[in-house]
Amino acid sequence: MRLQSLAIATPDPITALGHMLALPFIVHALVAGTAIAIVSGLVGYFVVLRGQVFAGDALGHVAYTGAFAALAVGLDLRIGMFAATIGAGLILGLLGGRSIADDVTIGTVFSWVLGLGVFFLAYYTTHDSTSNGAANVNVLFGSLFGISTPAMWTAVAVAAVLVIAILTIARPLLFASIDSAVAAAAGVPVRALGALFLALVGATAAEASQIVGALLLFGLLAAPAAAARRLTPDPWRALWLAALLATASVWAGIAISYAAPTLPVSFTIMTAAAALYAGSFLRRASTTADNVAVRASVM
């Protein structure tokens, strides 16, 4: 009798999926999350390939600082996020001294920005925190289930622009990432390209902060891309596979969080991304042939 009651109370997967997709906040999360995941995967592939995961993490914290700087002066926090991350990305690229900004440059900028973030957080908390009391949590850990319809379409539009931008520079960026000296000799503007790429990473960080938060976004950039790079040595396949794995992480995270409401969606998304990366170790790494494949694709 108890089993019969349980069978009646538990809907089949198709019915449960229908119920989930009937909720507007789930649809908003899926649409915005998919758009952001695609650009995160594409940008993340080059972040991993160029060894700039630390830069992605640093720009996530810059997004936090930018958000509270904007709130402190009465602006929308997204304005501060994009202005700060894009600006920081350009500075990191131009001050690096090489095609890829080194860890000393990134660490120095990162430390100063964190201090600045503490200042803006203190100012906002003591002056105007009552107008947006949840801002600190939302910026740190994301608020995917709180995205409105206008915010959803804004996320799609921004992601589309970023995808077009990264695909436009993909081939010369790939060349410069593998052999910057040869690329420079061939006429590729390596330093400018590196600065532009970090600006795109910054914009992606600002956009991705909406779904997984400033503290966790670098995982969405790194884990799917690292898994894709392990699974295939072909750079173009890995590029799109990274976007696919990032999207799968977002979808799985949303579904798990919906099924278990006590689990934050940012946590479930990052758990799914980490699981995909861990699963990639079940297959022998393909990165040993990665340089050969990449060189062949850009020559």
Image (tube, rainbow, N blue to C red):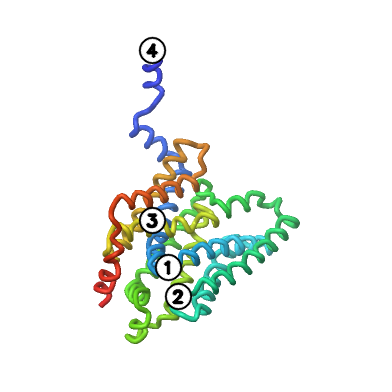
Specify the amino acid type for callout 3: Pro
Specify the amino acid type for callout 4: Met
Label 3: element kind? helix
Instruction: Measuring from the top left, give residue 108's x and y in whole percent.
Output: 59, 71
The residue that disc 4 covers is: 1
Picture layout, residue 186 above or below residue 205: below
Q: Is residue 64 left or right of residue 241?
A: right
The residue that disc 3 covers is: 224
Of 270 and 166, which appears nearest the observer? 270
The quadrant of the image that shows the C terminus is bottom left
Marks 2 and 1, the one that precedes in the sequence: 1
Q: Nearer the viewer, mark 1 or mark 4?
A: 1
Discs 2, 1 touching: Cβ within 8 Å: yes
Q: Nearer the viewer, mark 1 or mark 3?
A: 1
| Distance (Cα) linking label 1 and label 4 | 59 Å
Of 216 and 78, which appears nearest the observer? 216
